[in-house]
Amino acid sequence: MFPEYDVIVVGAGHAGCEAAVAAANLGSRVLLVTMNMQTIAQMSCNPAMGGVAKGQIVREIDALGGYSGIVTDHTMVQFRLLNRSKGPAMWSPRAQSDRMLFARKWRTMLEEHPLIDFWQEMVNGLVVHDGRVKGVRTGMGLEIPAKAVVLTNGTFLNGVIHIGEKQMGGGRAGESAARGITEQLIELGFEAGRMKTGTPPRVDGRSLNYEAMEVQPGDDDPGKFSFTDTPKLLRQLPCHVTYTSSEVHEILRTGFDRSPMFNGRIQGTGPRYCPSIEDKIDRFSDRDRHQLFVEPEGWDTCEIYVNGFSSSLPEDVQFKALRKIPGFEQAKMFRPGYAIEYDYFPPTQLGLSLETHLVKNLFFAGQINGTTGYEEAASQGLMAGINAHLAIREEEPFILKRSEAYIGVLIDDLVTKGTQEPYRMFTSRAEYRILLRQDNADLRLTPLAYRLGVRGADERMDRVRQKEAAAASIRGFLESYSVEPGQINGVLEAYGSAPSRQKVKLDSILVRPNIALQSLREALPELQAFLQDFPAEYTDLAEINMKYEGYIRKEQEMVGKMNRLEEVRLRDDFDYSKVSSLSKEAREKLSRMRPRTIGQASRISGVSPADISVLLVFMGR
């Protein structure tokens, strides 16, 4: 009935969709298996993509040929570039999406791919022979053969939904949990754990009083995620901001005795940086209010997502508390918030390619690895799909360094350090933030996709070359064009900068604090005339590279030093137990985690600098 597929992807969430596309765009024949074809790429939680560090990840996915950025650009209802008042390393794009259009666009793009097939059914087991995955087994007893399998099960593995004292099996509201895979993996020797996440209630936007809230509009000149020719956003929907109060908190506390979080029914660890509202008022009892973001779910729906009000309290308590929030006095609730517990597998059981140590050609991506967030999941799916394709051809895995991408930081953190709580990406997790900006993701990563042979990378590479040439041209003009004091001192004084006393080159003016290229354009017609045909992304790149050149060079030097350790490879069959000079803890952890390089070994908790010195000596370094 089924041919032998190159890659089977189990689960069609954000990780599964990107995994399928990544493998297929390299030439693999892919089967995407999902329990429900109607929920492909469902935005299970908030209707948004991007944000701090997450926006950088979406742009990196796009630069590597993934589809998340393209889908977002086609379906967003609002765009904002966050942290614009800070340095460019912190600038992070974020978009509100039309939730239904988002899923529809993803499904359309998947169905248009000639190398992707679909099968709607639950997978409850793997076919494994001699330590190598050979396919999947479905609930109807079908065995579908494959050379590699990527598991992207999200919150569905033995998922349990909690609302107050009620609990029910499920991977998402109204959908069944997946059973059988966890049990088989444990039999194969894998370690499993439990995690918890949650979602807020959805309300009827027609019942809200927006006049009582603060308006949060999109950017005046909205940007986009993809480096390709996706459509520009011409109209936007506003979001709104409101706040809880002491009265709201008191009502919520009345349900604490029935809360699964506080009475011990939830055993899994929840996300530290996106806690439920009851967790917030318990942990931050000195705060008399918390900010809530009122986010539309799309162009043609009145459904509203109450960001910041995630809860597993009884539905009657949620409803009473909601109605005490400014603007929610007459609110109608579509469905209550809930918490969900699910199985995950500590990611230290994976290599940097996301292939499991115990079963050859089996890959994990997304929440099964202990992460939270669409963007984190999608990036893992992309990398797992690429590496599944390479593994079945016995080619070297594609691994991004920490200095190359936030995706590299994410995977290295997971595999090397593990996680005891849902992992979320932040800019603070990256050592080389000034190198890993959202504006240069294409320059960093598209050449790598081009060398891999990703479908469509030729055209993307042409764009990269054009962008690099434009930035060099802009820099050349600024370094060669001289201005008299009378031409520029008005701008300098307006921004609190010392006036120029002699004729100077424009580049020496641009690198001053508080002086932006846009301000210089407005004062100098010749500069405006030169730059008018360059897109903003080209001028932004040139300006950032010039203003932050010293910081960029310093980080590049740091990368060079670290890469010397990253280039010292460790054999997969290295017997650490025989290196008696290593500490006992180092021998145990190195044997279990099988680091790929000395650099990765140095980041394992419990492996000391002295242990690294021993390894270097042992290897003749």
Image (cartoon, grey):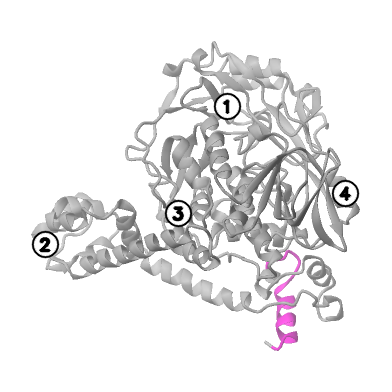
Mark 4 belongs to which amino acid?
Gln
**Mark 2 neighbour class, 10 Å CA radius: few under 14, some 14 to 19, many 20 or more:** some
- Image quarter for residue 221? top left
Q: CA distance from mark 4 to mark 1?
A: 48 Å
- Report the side of 445 relative to 358 (left or right): left
- The residue to which callout 1 is attached is 288
Q: Residue at x 70, y 47 (%)?
A: 152
Residue at mark 3: 438
- The kind of secondary structure element at disc 3 is loop
Q: For marks 1 and 2, give the one nearer the viewer.
A: 2
Considering only order in the chain, which callout, 3 or 1, is on the residue closer to the N terminus?
1
- What is the crowding at mark 1: few (fewer than 14 residues within 10 Å), some, or many (at least 20)? some
Residue 30 image position (x, y, % from top left): 66, 52
Numbered disc in front, either 4 or 2: 4
Viewer can see residue 410 = yes
| Residue that protrudes farthest toward the top in the picture | 330
- Which of pointers 1 and 3 indicates the residue nearer the eye? 3
Q: Which residue is mark 4?
A: 184
Per the image, label 2 sits on a secondary structure element best described as helix
**SS under mark 1:** loop
Q: Which residue is located at x 69 percent, y 51 percent?
A: 365
Marks 4, 1: nearer the viewer: 4
Which type of secondary structure does the marked residue at label 4 adopt? helix
- Rounded to the nearest angstrom, the CA distance separating label 3 from label 2 is 35 Å
Q: Return the x and y of residue 254 as percentages of the image width and height.
A: 72, 18
Q: Which residue is mark 2?
A: 485
**Label 4 neighbourhood size at 10 Å, few (<14), some (14-19), many (20+)?**
some
From this view, report whether residue 211 is shown above or below residue 156. Answer: above
**Left or right of 354 on screen, residue 190:** right
Question: Which portion, as a residue range, is magenta?
Answer: 603-620
